[in-house]
């Protein structure tokens, strides 16, 4: 899911290394699309690689890095992006074994001090493997915890847009989740809070400044608001504005990314986030793998995203395969083999 992956995919990348205009309806005849055959081949390679990672509990990029480990990740028990990694496997048909579930439950760190980002990520990750986050017994605990209730009782006022988006996705991911009494927010109020953090160029940033607006944070905000299903006019306008920002800022290659020191940095992670946001409406879905958005665009976002997938299933330039596989596989699921679906990718029931 969204988790620290959003910060990792945009903020960390930036640290390591205009106004909305009408979207031009261009002739898509020359734009390269991801064929059914290539999609199947790329997804098979991704899945094979990820299954190996799950079996070995190791990140594919760094053989020593584990996916689940209390010692390696003392505050969470898992690598950044683990929830999307698990959800991606689920979407590709993986059946989690008892050993898998035991590994996850043994290592995840969830307690009374867990912050909103940790709770939100766990809610998605646990559902992906078939565990109930409203009746979850963390390792070493004597009683079950309702992670959804705990998240609802966390204040969102001083959280970043990324964390607010994570929280909204988590509480909106299952229609059986109920808002408890004394909740600090509702899906509608949190959607509105996110909408009001939109910057003057119609995008969102990790630190709420227009100078730091990026495609990852914008896409995450759009996806979260769409999942929240608010009917508030401000929210609805913000959703449209966010998609328009992405359409305006797609690279001619069809990829999304970030610009640092005047240099474009397209990447698989950002492109995946863009696909997730474009997949939220039937109107914008066609831009995922059917039509060009910009004049001169050479490939669709789906084609661009899969161009980063190597023959062995690893992802080019990824510094974390947990993060990269998770985002790319979830985005591929949102693309839904070219058929639009109203059920968004983070919806479980």
Image: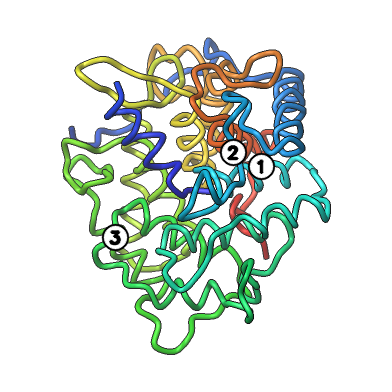
Left or right of residue 146: residue 295: left
Q: How far is the residue under mark 2 from the one under mark 3?
A: 24 Å
Where is residue 161? Give x, y as percent: 31, 53
Q: Which residue is mark 2?
A: 326
Q: Residue furthest front?
A: 71
Left or right of residue 151: residue 35: right
How does the figure colour the protein chain or chains?
A: rainbow
| 111 in relation to 277, above or below | below
- Nearer the observer, 60 or 73: 73
Q: Which residue is mark 1?
A: 88
> On the image, which quarter does residue 38 sit in?
top right
| 302 in relation to 96, above or below | above
Are there few (<14), some (14-19), or many (20+) residues within 10 Å of tag 2? many
| 327 in relation to 131, above or below | above
The reply to whether dot 2 and dot 1 touch (C-beta < 8 Å) is yes
Residue 159 - label = 3
Residue drawn where x is 63% and y is 26% of the image:
60
Circle 2 sits in a helix, a strand or a loop, which is it? Answer: helix
Residue drawn where x is 44% and y is 65% of the image:
114
Where is residue 193? Give x, y as percent: 28, 64
Where is residue 37? Give x, y as percent: 76, 19
Specify which label sits upstream in the sequence, 1 or 3: 1
Are there few (<14), some (14-19), or many (20+) residues within 10 Å of tag 1? many
Left or right of residue 254: residue 136: right
Q: How far is the residue under mark 2 from the one under mark 1?
A: 5 Å
Specify which label sits upstream in the sequence, 2 or 3: 3
Residue drawn where x is 47% and y is 58% of the image:
118
Specify which label sits upstream in the sequence, 2 or 1: 1
């Amino acid at each position: 899911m969204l988790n620290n992956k959003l910060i990792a995919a945009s903020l960390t990348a930036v640290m390591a290394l205009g106004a909305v205009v009408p979207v031009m309806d261009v002739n898509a005849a020359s734009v390269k699309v991801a064929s059914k055959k290539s999609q199947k081949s790329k997804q098979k390679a991704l899945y094979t690689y990820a299954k190996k990672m799950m079996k070995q509990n190791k990140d594919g990029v760094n053989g020593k890095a584990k996916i689940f480990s209390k010692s390696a990740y003392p505050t969470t028990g898992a690598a950044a992006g683990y929830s999307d990694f698990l959800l991606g496997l689920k979407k590709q048909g993986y059946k989690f074994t008892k050993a898998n579930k035991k590994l996850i439950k043994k290592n995840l760190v969830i307690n009374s001090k867990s912050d909103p980002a940790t709770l939100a990520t766990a809610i998605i990750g646990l559902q992906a493997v078939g565990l109930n986050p409203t009746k979850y017994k963390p390792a070493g605990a004597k009683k079950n915890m309702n992670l959804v209730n705990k998240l609802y009782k966390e204040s969102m006022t001083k959280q970043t847009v990324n964390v607010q988006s994570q929280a909204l996705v988590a509480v909106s991911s299952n229609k059986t989740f109920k808002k408890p009494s004394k909740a600090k927010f509702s899906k509608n109020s949190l959607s509105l809070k996110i909408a009001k953090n939109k910057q003057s160029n119609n995008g969102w940033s990790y630190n709420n400044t227009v100078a730091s607006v990026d495609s990852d944070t914008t896409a995450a905000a759009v996806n979260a608001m769409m999942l929240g299903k608010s009917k508030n006019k401000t929210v609805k306008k913000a959703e449209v504005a966010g998609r328009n920002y992405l359409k305006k800022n797609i690279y001619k290659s069809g990829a999304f990314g970030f610009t640092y020191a005047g240099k474009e940095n397209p990447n698989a992670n950002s492109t995946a986030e863009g696909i997730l946001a474009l997949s939220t409406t039937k109107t914008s879905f066609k831009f995922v793998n059917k039509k060009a958005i910009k004049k001169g665009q050479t490939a669709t976002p789906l084609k661009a995203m899969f161009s980063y997938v190597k023959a062995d299933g690893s992802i080019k330039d990824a510094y974390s395969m947990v993060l990269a596989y998770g985002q790319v596989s979830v985005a591929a699921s949102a693309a839904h083999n070219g058929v639009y679906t109203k059920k968004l990718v983070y919806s479980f029931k």
